[in-house]
Image (spheres, grey):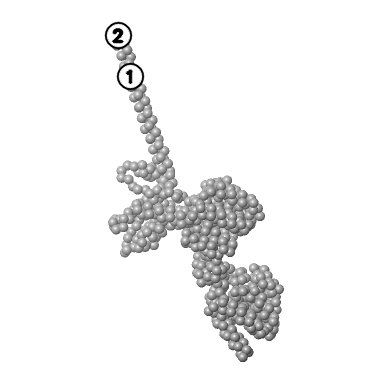
Amino acid sequence: MKIIDKLKIEKEEIYNLWDKTQTFSANFLKVFLASIFLVLVIHTSLEIFNDDLVIKPFETPSQLARESGYTGVVVARQLQDKMDEIREEIHKSSSGETVQGFITAQFSELQKQQKIDIPIVGLSLNTIVYQFRKMFGMEQRSITGDVVKKDEKFYLTLRITGKTVVNLEPDTDIDKLINEAAREVIKKLEPLTFGLNYYSNNKQKELSSLINELRQVGRFQRTKLSQKEEAIALTLEGCLLAIQTKPKQAIEKFVEAEEFKLSSAIKKTILHIKGNAFKSLQEYDKAIYSYKRALKFDSKRSGNIYVQWAIALIAKGKVEKAELKFEEAAKKDSDNAWVYTAWGERLLAIKLKKYTEAYDKFAKAQEINPNYALNYAIWGDTLFADKNYPEAIKKFERAIELDSNIPAWLYLKYGLALSKLGKHQKAVKKYERAIKLNPRTASMTYYHLGKTLIELEQYEQAVVQFQDAIKFGNYHAWSYIKLGYVLLLLQKPQEALIQCKAVLKLSDAKDDDAKAGAYAICGLAQLKLNQPKKAFEDCETALSLNKKEDWANWCLGDIYMSRNEQKNAVKQYEAAVNLKPKDSLYRYKYGQALAKSGQSEKTITQYQKVIEIDKDSELSKQAQIEIEKLKNSSSQLLQ
């Protein structure tokens, strides 16, 4: 009996355990299914309200897929890849503080990781999300389009949600067309990416065109721009004014942009640029305040702002505090190569002349990013300032190799380095490249190109360059002076006189060196116009302003020679030769004066120097003739 009772108890316990297990399993399954359902609901809700951009497969003819493998999905993926390539290209070609600061701050709706929407047959989450969006009247941000082939040309049309339809010019190369489509998408949805790149590279025309395009979108749709778009427009208008050297008006635009409800990253970017505008006005305390505010909104990857803060401190003469800011920038943004590049350039090379330390900073930037073109450019610029021209050229070459869109100033410095090494023909090509990149702001480049053409004895072309330097620069005194000098070489003294007199009326001709140069050119011009008395007065004035004005020595030497005062002439030409020992004209005139004063051996020495300096020039040929005459006359005397 006891055994039976025991078995009954055990049986009941087993049944109870089984009931509990069933109950637990049922509850667990309910909770599990409920959790999955909740996750699906949350995910679906997020997808419904997610504002990610979707690139949908393009409509393409079946013939295109058969011939070249370009299906709609392939075109969409190609478009996505090209967009990333263009961003990287823009990132690389953006100068200074914009390299990692501005370009990464997105004003626009577009995120960097776009989705490719590949359709799935049957019921899917995408279908459910689509239906819900349709029910709620919510339009998914998307890029759609179609490709058509006609007469061996491809026609690509883009349709961007909330934007106008973009019809691209047909092309026989579909890859080229997709590349252009990618550029148009970024311009439409990321205008700040392009705009800030134009701002950093001083591309006024392109920036103005982009702003007009952005403003016109709203007009065509007869709707107002969104808050983000209006903020972009105002910010880029401020950037344009900054390029046009109107920082006060630029700041007003930035203040307007700040009034919109924007993300922290956007506020940070506006305050960063506004701080730069204050810095250009030399209002350094306001600039620093703007940088501080920017950091409060977002302190991540803010090395660029600390760099600008440091530069403002340098301008205030607080070099030690500036160095601490550079150190802080390096800590906060250790993988930002620009921090070390700016540190080397601004603090060490320019202000303290510690070139070795500057080179260490550039080397650190190179370690962080071996392909950072701007670092090589500024490194080369610093080597140029250190008069190490061969090494500077190597850095310039590396910068150009890495980035063909390198700013115009690098080609100017490259040309100057080549000129310093006497490689004038190569220098001309670099100057011409700089002018092509930025003709309207190339006044100094025109000037240096003109000087190089003088060295190559291409005087007519030099005249054109100096005229362009004046046209685009207006108040560069030395462009007028050099133009007057070339006109003298072309035997046009009256025109040269006009140029030198114009210099004395210019606002930037206040320094004595420029005035001295102008008076010397006037003196030389008047001498050729048979006005020796006035010429003498002007050249004496030139030397009183600048004892190292070699043109004045040349002028006075010629006057003394015309008076048959050979001893005085010798002194003036000797002074000119001491100032410009590689000037063959001075050597030749010095030789002439020595010959007339009966100093044959010294005369031959000067003529030999002329031949050594300019082997194939007309002057060297004449010098050789004079040497032969002297030698013949000496041999006749001995006989």
Say which quarter of the image contains residue 566: bottom right
Give how far apart the Cα atoms at labels 2 and 1 are: 20 Å
Q: Determine whether, in the image, residue 48 is placed left or right of residue 577.
A: left
Q: Determine whether, in the image, residue 209 is placed left or right of residue 5.
A: right
Vertically, is 269 above or below 416? above
Q: How many marks?
A: 2
**Which residue of the protein is positioned furthest toward the top in this rendering?**
1
Residue 13 image position (x, y, % from top left): 34, 17
Q: Quadrant of the C terminus?
A: bottom right
Nearest to the observer: residue 272 or residue 89: 89
Q: Residue placed at 37% from the left, 50% from the top?
A: 56
Residue 83 image position (x, y, % from top left): 42, 54
- The tag on residue 14 is 1
Q: State the SS at label 1.
A: helix
Q: Earlier in the sequence, mark 2 or mark 1?
A: 2
Q: Residue placed at 62% from the left, 54% from the top?
A: 312
Vertically, is 468 above or below 13? below
Residue 362 image position (x, y, % from top left): 54, 55
Residue type at mark 2 is Met
Other residues around mark 1 within 10 Å, as few (<14) / some (14–19) / many (≥20): few
Say which quarter of the image contains residue 493: bottom right
Q: Determine whether, in the image, residue 92 is placed left or right of residue 312.
A: left
User: Is any part of residue 638 visible from this angle?
Assistant: yes
Residue hosting label 2: 1
Q: In which quarter of the image is the N terminus?
A: top left
Residue 248 image position (x, y, % from top left): 61, 57
Q: Determine whether, in the image, residue 315 is placed left or right of residue 17.
A: right
Q: Residue placed at 61% from the left, 79% from the top?
A: 606
Nearest to the observer: residue 582 or residue 90: 582
Nearest to the observer: residue 613 or residue 134: 613
Residue type at mark 1 is Ile
